[in-house]
Amino acid sequence: MKAKFIRGMTTGAIIGVTAGMLLVPQMNRSTRKRLRRGSRNMLNTAEDAYDTFMNWMR
C-alpha cells in the first residue's frame, strides 16, 4: 500500500517537472540546467525514501 503511494508521488513529481518545463515560455540554458538538477535531486530523494520505507516494512 505504501509502496504504491511513494511510486505515485514520484510519478507525480516527474510529471510536474515535465509540465513545468513545457509551460515556461522563455527558458534559457541556466533555467533548464537548474530544472534538470532539481528533478534529479527530487528523483534521488524519492528513491531513497522508497528504499527506506521498504526496509522499514520488512
Image (cartoon, helix red, strand yellow):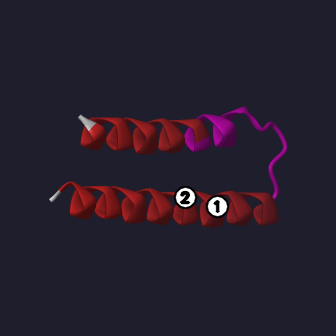
Q: Residue at x 33, y 63 (%)?
A: 52
Q: Is residue 9 above or below residue 32?
A: above
Q: Residue at x 44, y 56 (%)?
A: 46
Question: Can residue 8 be found in the magenta stretch?
Answer: no
Helix, strand or loop under label 2? helix
Under mark 2, the amino acid is: Met
Under mark 1, the amino acid is: Gly
**x, y (%) of residue 39?**
57, 57
> Residue 30 shows which numbered tag?
none
Cβ atoms under marks 2 and 1 closer than 8 Å: yes
Q: Quadrant of residue 32?
A: bottom right
Q: Is residue 44 above or below residue 35?
A: below
**Does residue 5 appear left or right of residue 19 in this picture?**
left
**x, y (%) of residue 35?**
68, 57
Q: Quadrant of residue 18?
A: top right
Q: Is residue 10 above or below residue 53?
A: above
Helix, strand or loop under label 1? helix
Q: Residues within 10 Å of mark 1 (few under 14, many from 20)?
A: few
Q: Which residue is mark 1?
A: 38
Q: Residue at x 70, y 66 (%)?
A: 33
Q: Residue furthest left?
A: 58
**Does residue 25 appear left or right of residue 35 in this picture?**
right
> Residue 42 shows which numbered tag?
2
**Does residue 16 appear left or right of residue 2 in this picture?**
right
Q: Residue at x 60, y 44 (%)?
A: 17
| Residue range corresponding to the magenta coloring | 17-28
**x, y (%) of residue 51?**
30, 63
Nearest to the observer: residue 11 or residue 29:
11
Q: CA distance from mark 2 to mark 1?
A: 6 Å
